[in-house]
Amino acid sequence: MSPSASFFFLLVLPWVGADVFMSSSRAHMLLHRSRRANSGYLEELKQGNLERECMEEMCNHEEAREVFEDDIKTEAFWTSYIGSHPCDANPCLNNGSCIYFEKMYLCQCLDGFEGKHCQEAFKDTLQCRYLNGGCEHFCEAKGHQHKCECAEGYTLGNDGKKCNPQVQYPCGKIAVSELTKHQTDRPDLRIVAGDQCLKGHCPWQVLLEHKGKSLCGGAIINTEWVITAAHCLSNRNVKDLKVVAGEHNLDLEEGSEQRIPVKQAVTHEHYNVTTGDSDIALLRLESPITLSPYAVPVCLPHRKFSETELSAVRFSTVSGWGSRTEGGNMWPGASSSTLASPILRKLLVPVLSSEECALKSGINLTSNMFCAGYFEGSSQGACRGDDGSPLVTQYKDTVFLTGLVGWGRGCAHPGYYEIFTKVSNFLDWLKEKMNTNTGILQQNEEFPMFDLEHALERRSVLGA
């Protein structure tokens, strides 16, 4: 062996006993191939590559959609990609739940998300607090969504917002001809004594008679029930009461009147004869009112709708025959020196805040009352509405009941205001009593008289 060969043999000999293979950690350091990352110019050029997105790695439904850029192709691939149980990979986003049916699945989204895979945040751009949700009548909110509802006698239109009448005489609609309608309902506030309500333009207004004499006002709720003030029934037997629907001129029989005896009366169980609180009553009729252009129900609102949308309307309308009725709670000392017109009248009045009313009148209202009218100006003449008569508020093209005339300052005084029962506080009570026979006042029972002067003393009135 040559010296050079011997030298090479001695040099290699120490490695003969060593391991042939490297350790896994050292091999990994030499052979590791970095996994892809969605970065870099070339990667952007390969966007949507099926092999990169779903073969090298497990992809989700959203990544598969980026590949095909088409819903149908994506679904066809996705079903075969994940096998016969698509919910195994849960294609639902934002914590949605996957529900599997035969060869298909459905994503059940959490509140606030929508879309086939719950991928979109729900945006209700017309919530109830904004423009009443676009609803013609009532807007009911539920979670992140809302829906429109209609008053009785209406159905929701195809647009989900408009309310279409389904009966000949729907509530809250004037049914007289458009020609006649054009001649009225253009209120002139310069007519301080109120404007005549043309025949058929206050069709929900009724007259309550006691032994043939005009007593109070009221309003038609439906063909069987009329609403009025509880104090109008004080010391009066129900069998002596009649409701006159279609009344307009007290001195003339015009052929539109319907005189119907009262069968039952229901007063609120918390009606207080001292304070006038909860001054509301229902009258059930012996026979139903025949609806006509001169006898139409007023719509009952939903409470939230009344307290948000209707309360935002600046002016409401009160109607009645004024001092031609004898059941009113006039302010002590008020007088009516001139004979009032026999024709039904109406007056636009602003609804006042309880604070403003208390400040200017000295009356501390309960939560079941509100104040409307004018505190400044000349005498209003014979403008005062009958006790029990309706205060109505128009919203879009429908009229809703918001108040009942209770008591207040007589129209012979400078300025005019009235205390009203807040109907929105009693909507549940009204529905309950009209749907049941509980709490019915029998015909031989009577109420104690409402003592207005005593009530004012108890409430520390500062003076007329």
Image (cartoon, helix red, strand yellow):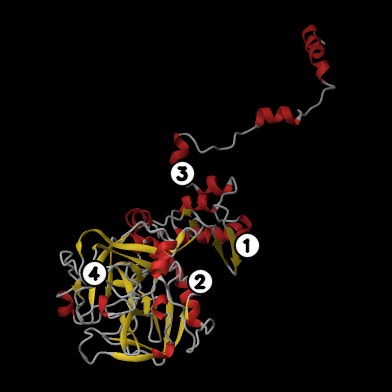
Of badges 2 and 4, nearer the viewer stands: 2
Which label sits in the foreground, 1 or 3? Answer: 1
- The residue depicted at 43 percent of the width and 72 percent of the height is 279
Instruction: Determine the CA span between mark 2 and mark 4.
Output: 30 Å
Residue receiving disc 4: 347
Q: Inspect the image, locate mark 3, and give the three-letter code of the amino acid beneath it.
A: Gln
| 3D distance between C-alphas at marks 1 and 3 | 28 Å
**Horizontal and vertical percent for residue 45?**
43, 40
Q: Earlier in the sequence, mark 2 or mark 4?
A: 2
Q: What label sits on residue 270 in the rendered view?
A: 2
Please, is residue 103 above or below residue 341 in the view? above
Please state which amino acid type lies under the numbered disc 2.
His
Of pointers 2 and 1, the one earlier in the residue sequence: 1
Task: Residue type at mark 1: give it.
Answer: His
Image height of 158 relative to 116, above or below: below
Residue occupying image coordinates x 81% and y 10%: 6
| Residue at the farthest right position | 17
| Nearer to us: label 2 or label 1 | 2
* For residue 257, above or below residue 162: below
Q: Secondary structure at mark 2?
A: loop
Identify the residue position indicated by label 3 in the image.
47
For the residue pair 61 and 388, the one nearer the viewer reads as 388
Amino acid tagged 4: Leu
Which comes sooner in the sequence, label 4 or label 3?
Answer: 3
Marks 2 and 4 in Cβ contact (< 8 Å): no
The residue identified by callout 1 is 85
